[in-house]
Image: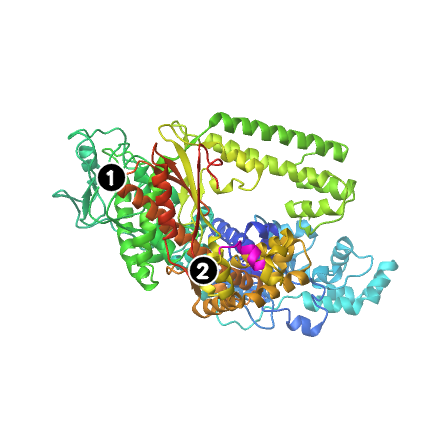
Amino acid sequence: MLMDGHSLAYRAFFALPAENFTTATGQPTNAVYGFASMLANTLRDEAPTHFAVAFDVSRKTWRSEEFTEYKANRSKTPDEFKGQVELIGELLDAMHAERFAVEGFEADDVIATLATQAEAEGFDVLIVTGDRDSFQLVSEHTTVLYPTKGVSELTRFTPEKVLEKYGLTPAQYPDFAALRGDPSDNLPGIPGVGEKTAAKWINQFGSFAELVDRVEEVKGKVGQNLRDHLESVKLNRRLTELERQVELPRGVPDLERAAYDRKAVAMLLDTLEIRNPSLRERLFAVDPGGEEAESTPVVEEGVELDGTVLGTGELAGWLTGHATGPSAWPRSAHGARHRLRRRGRPGDVRRTGRLVRPVRAGRGRRAGVRRLARRRGAAQGVPQRQGAMRVFAEHGWTIEGVTMDTALAAYLVKPGRRSFDLDALSLEYLHRELAPAAAPDGQLAFGADDSAEAEVLMVQARAVLDLGEAFEGRLAEVGAADLLRDMELPTSALLARMERHGIAAGREHLQAMEQMFAGAVQQAVKEAHEAAGHEFNLGSPKQLQEVLFGELSLPKTKKTKTGYTTDADALAWLATQTDNELPVIMLRHREQAKLRVTVEGLIKTIAADGRIHTTFNQTVAATGRLSSTDPNLQNIPVRTDEGRAIRRGFVVGEGFESLLTADYSQIELRVMAHLSEDAGLIEAFTSGEDLHTTAAAQVFSVEQSAVDAEMRRKIKAMSYGLAYGLSAFGLSQQLNIEAAEARALMDAYFERFGGVRDYLRRVVDEARATGYTATLFGRRRYLPDLNSDNRQRREAAERMALNAPIQGTAADIVKIAMLNVDRALREADLSSRMLLQVHDEIVLELAPGERATVEDLVRREMASAVELRVPLGVSVGAGPDWESAAH
């Protein structure tokens, strides 16, 4: 099987929207994904023994030398496509697939050469390409698979199919193509001559050469047109013929398929943030070395459990016999063990559930042991290596002495990866593939016939242990061992308790909010229909485009593949360009619909105890920030009336007195002042005056009393923007000012705060040299794209280099503060407890009579979390609900 790499990559690029396939660094991957998907399917369906992919080198070929206008009409290659062919090449290399690119020739010529050689050596040949010139290669032993819909549907062109489609034999196709011309290659056709006439002439005269010899016999105007353009048609014929004698470095015998470098394939997919597990499975399913891939032996010498040595296949029976007695579960597959004990009366240990789910690494909250048993209690033991301890807290277990979490360790070693699945980590770091779980949902109910499932667990447990040992060395190499031990593991334990506590929710209040937003949505729909003059589907971009730009003739927005964009930015711009109220109504409709969905989600997640138990994620944000899901509490607006009303639905729970909120004031800017050592910015913080007013007075060279709201707004946007890597263009968009004015504002800011300018330059230069940035506490973020040839990727990496140390240090400080507050609460034997962490804010539930003590404790511990060149400002408030507790 021979593939035209450029042709198929380009088709894949246009078949999938780039905006849906882009990495965090801005690298589009739609062409890579589409090509890989088509490749996996085609290898599966056709099962070739030999395989190669050919690529174009450049547009300079023997054809362009003979005809300078060859392909000259083609548009510039989209920026989003650039670089993806190279990535496809990396994928093929990882698959140990041969690829060719020969200077001066096109991919078609390479394919023609290989196909001719293969047929001569007795092979049947499949050619996968989107170029119809390849139809001339079709024979009894060569078939062309031609994409007819993106890259998902391929039509088989055999000699019979070519004859059916064009009324010609494959050998006659170049003659036909020469007469027809090819606009895509800029080969001129003959006026008045289309495919039907071209095919008729070839059938009438038998060949192009015969037609040329008897050209005077062609009558009428088209005959004269043919004679007038005969020389250009002859040139077409030479250029259309594929070269079958290209000198190649390797021959057909070298194309035999070989086993993948599965680790390299997995790493590339992870790097490109291609998360679809189906693609990975399909690619690995057609690995020629799959059956011989390295297997993971189940422990050969057996597993020791309380003096009993179990051989292969005996674990299931042992578990069945010991499930109702005192629990002693293996923590690894080579001898180490720990006991799980239950608080309560001696002997009061009952089996109220079944052992389900294997020891796993990664996948957020359900990382580690998915569920152990439906018991309530505590566990203590020797240091253990397990995927994650937080799931135990879901059922009341407290695990102490944990020294390794493979998901957190993988995150610290490579924070930019998107998957911390045990299988992927095992493949990458142990070069070992794990057997899939026996059941689709992974639930394993042990019984007499469950030895296979038990062995799966043993293999996975061994992988977790070995990964832990591997990560100990990796963490030491990147200086992150202390981060895991002193910050991430204690934070994981704290988050487990916070998730279990949850926060009380006022169901009736939230239901009333949902109804209010639903009514607002319906009202917006009614108003939109009135503004348009008829009903239409507000959720249909196509219908909205027709109304806005067709019927109402509003100014055109940015053009996309599906028409003129109608996103929020476009609607906001339209609102300033027209008196028509529809753009404003659409913005309100979307905002109210979003709020309704948010509240509906909150209502659905209220548990039987009347509380919402969100899931905190430690391994999502590369900067180290925590996030939350199910529900996402960071998604609730803070500065709008609607958002504040939603926050009133989070209330103090039964048995507690009030909620307390505490957060850092301008923590990112304080970190920036510390890192940059800028004297002016440090003075602005230490003076006790309003930072943005003080900074605005310096930038605009006026007294603080003369700083107006607009001046302060611009400086505030500037200050925070710099902490997030904002460019002059981004600032102009944010402030709705000209780019030149934004640049002048930025220059004036840097003139006053030169230390900030120097720091921002220095941090990018250092990251470019080392390949990473680091926080004050040593948390690294690797940015290989800082040296990329792709401008988009390089600039995205530069923005990340600017904000990663600031954002990451702020995130680390918040974690330290959380740990300090939690430790102080427990040491003081207080009943108040921490419930939430959202952005830079923590939320606590206060026990009766403890408010003053806790408030002092929180202020002290947060303010002393770290010593910076500027003080850490802490704001605290209390009230019966989250909004009332704001400060």
Element marked by disc 1: helix
| Amino acid tagged 1 | Ser
Which residue is at 64% across, 57% downward? 732
- The three-letter code of the residue at mark 2 reads Pro
SS category of the residue bearing label 2: helix
Q: Which mark is residue 451?
A: 1
Q: Does residue 638 appear left or right of residue 810 in this picture?
A: right
Residue 205 appears in view: yes
Give the labeled residue for mark 2: 805
**Quick one: label 2, few (<14), some, or many (20+) residues within 10 Å?**
many
**Residue 524 falls inside the magenta stretch:** no
454 or 421, which lies in front?
A: 421
Q: Residue furthest top?
A: 508
Looking at the image, residue 70 sits to the left or right of residue 31; the answer is right
Q: Please report the bounds of the magenta region as a residue range.
A: 688-696
Indicate which disc residue 220 carries.
none
Single out the mark in the foreground, 1 or 2.
2
Counting residues from the N terminus, which is met first, the one under dot 1 or under dot 2?
A: 1
The residue lying toward the viewer, choosing from 400 and 79, is: 400
